[in-house]
Amino acid sequence: MVFTIRAFVTFFTIIDPVGLAPVVIGLTAHFNDAQRRSIVTTILYVDLAAPNILDMLSVAAAIISALFTAWLVMRSSLWIVRRVGRTGILVVSRILGILLAALAVQFILNGIASFGHLGR
């Protein structure tokens, strides 16, 4: 259902990005925050790429490749769990947690740096 709504919203964003706001709010009323953010991010990327067909195709290719990669990982998750094992899953989750923390720190530092440039 989320994919159908995302495709519908993306299609109509090409036609009228500003007039779509009430439609997006109505269609995503029952979604959680992460799903709504995902759809709005897609809308913004499509809106930025709308004037150029090559940019639009690259956004579509990025969305399709991300969906395919997620599907492939979920489809082979049992094989991955059997192959890596419980300890490997714990190690990978710790490494990804450290990576996420590093990204969060970098975002904070970038925000502080850009805030410092605003005062000049």
Image (cartoon, rainbow, N blue to C red):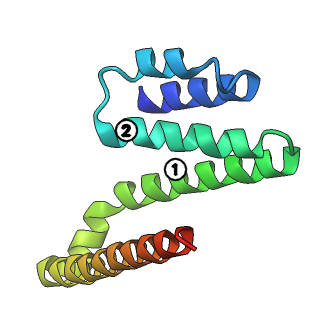
Q: Amino acid at mark 1?
A: Leu
Residue 4 image position (x, y, % from top left):
51, 26
Looking at the picture, tell me which residue is in the foreground, 74 or 9: 9
Q: Residue 35 got which mark?
A: 2
Q: Give the mark, 2 or 1, whose residue is nearer the N terminus.
A: 2
Q: Which residue is drawn at the image coordinates 43% and 20% (left, top)?
A: 25
Q: Is 112 located above or below residue 95 in the figure?
A: above
- Residue drawn at 48 percent across, 78 percent down: 113
Residue 92 lies, with reference to residue 27, above or below; the image says below
Position of 3 with respect to 33 (left or right) is right
Please say if the residues under marks 2 and 1 sit with CB atoms less than 8 Å apart.
Answer: no
User: Which residue has dot 1 on it?
Assistant: 67
Q: Amino acid at mark 2?
A: Gln
Query: Quick one: 23 or 106, which is closer to the camera?
Result: 106
Q: Position of residue 42 (x, y in %)?
A: 57, 42
Q: Position of residue 52 (x, y in %)?
A: 87, 45
Determine which quarter of the picture holds residue 76: bottom left
Q: Please state, as top left, top right, bottom left or bottom right, where the N terminus lies in the image.
A: top left
Q: Residue at x 85, y 40 (%)?
A: 51
Residue at image position (52%, 44%) is 41
> Which quadrant: the C terminus?
bottom right
